[in-house]
Image (cartoon, rainbow, N blue to C red):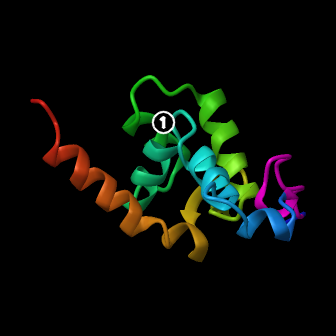
Amino acid sequence: MASRTPPANSIADIPDRARTEGPFSPLFHVAAELVGRRWTGAILFALAHGMHRFSELEAAIPGLSARLLTERLRELEGADIVEPVPQEGGTRWSYRLTEKGDALRPVMMALNRWAVDWSDS
């Protein structure tokens, strides 16, 4: 598979000096912006729960269009968080978390626990 160019606001675009200075963490900001994009958390949560086929992801997340799912999967692939896996015949794909993506699993589970604990309902 061809390598993709990182997004314009990727960690690679941050100078070393800016990574270590001041109370604002550019690395945290880039990570939060990536994971916090609309639908991205839901996609990662679904992948972490064993939904790997495009159709499974689409069905699991109400309101998410196929176009936006494709866009978010490509962004996550470009960030090396998700990788596509060709299915038999090569016309269909499934997706899985990379090692980097799987390292987000405890973060997602902690966020889910926080949401459940602090829900008003």
In the displayed structure, 120 sits above or below 79; it is above
Q: Magenta segment: does it hold 5?
A: yes
The three-letter amino acid code for the residue at tag 1 is Glu
Q: Residue 22 location, x and y as percent?
A: 68, 60
In the displayed structure, 80 sits above or below 116; it is below
Is residue 29 visible from the viewing direction of this image? yes
- Classify residue 27 by image quadrant: bottom right
Count of marks placed on residues: 1
Query: Which quadrant: the C terminus?
Result: top left
Q: Pick whichever, 19 or 76, lies toward us.
A: 19
Q: Residue 58 location, x and y as percent?
A: 48, 36
Classify residue 92 as left or right of residue 103: right
- Residues in magenta? 3-13
- The extreme front residue here reads 22
Task: Tell me the SS state at disc 1.
Answer: helix
Residue pictured at 28% horizontal, 51% vertical: 112
- Classify residue 118 by image quadrant: top left
Name the residue that disc number 1 marks.
58
Mark 1 nearby-residue class (10 Å; few <14, some 14–19, many ≥20): some
Query: Which quadrant: the N terminus?
Result: bottom right
Q: Magenta segment: does it hold 99?
A: no
